[in-house]
Image: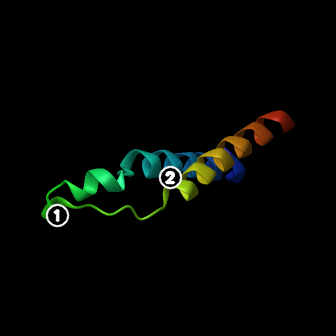
């Protein structure tokens, strides 16, 4: 695997985990505050990482 493919897979993984762990602020208001978990990457950056990773994989595939 080339570095571009690895970077694309890493970006896809970061994007998916960011979107999977995103919690709605309204749900957080009604949840117990001791069990509050924070999201390190905002969902818009997670979506951009996902799109960028897919674009890198398609760009790599197109060149081959």
Tell whether 41 sits left or right of 38. right
- The answer to whether mark 1 and mark 2 are in CB contact below 8 A is no
Give the image location of residue 10, x and y in percent.
56, 51
Residue 35 position (above or below residue 24): below
Q: Residue at x 35, y 51 (%)?
A: 23
The image quadrant that residue 62 belongs to is: top right
Which residue does the numbered mark 2 point to in the structure image? 14
Disc 2, SS: helix
Mark 2 nearby-residue class (10 Å; few <14, some 14–19, many ≥20): many
The residue that appears at 75% across and 37% down in the rendered structure is 58
Asked if one can make out residue 16 in the rendered structure from this viewpoint, the answer is: yes
Label 1: how many Cα within 10 Å (few below 14, some 14–19, many 20+): few
37 horizontally vs 34: left or right: right
Q: Position of residue 56 (x, y in %)?
A: 72, 46
Question: Residue 64: in sight, yes or no?
Answer: no
Disc on the earlier residue, 1 or 2: 2
| Separation of marks 1 and 2 at Cα, in angstroms | 26 Å
Tally the marks. 2
Mark 1 secondary-structure assignment: helix
Q: Position of residue 31 (x, y in %)?
A: 18, 54
Name above or below for residue 16 compared with residue 38: above
The disc placed on residue 48 is none
Which of 64/49 is in front?
49
Judge left or right: residue 9 versus residue 28: right
**Quadrant, the N terminus:** top right
- What residue lies at 77% left-to-right and 35% top-to-bottom? 61
| Residue position marked by numbered label 1 in the rendering | 33
Q: Quadrant of residue 57?
A: top right
């Amino acid at each position: 695997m080339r570095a571009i493919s690895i970077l694309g897979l890493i970006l896809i993984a970061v994007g998916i985990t960011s979107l999977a762990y995103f919690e709605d602020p309204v749900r957080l208001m009604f949840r117990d505050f001791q069990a509050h978990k924070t999201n390190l990457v905002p969902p818009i950056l997670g979506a951009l990482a996902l799109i960028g990773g897919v674009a890198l994989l398609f760009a790599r595939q197109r060149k081959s």
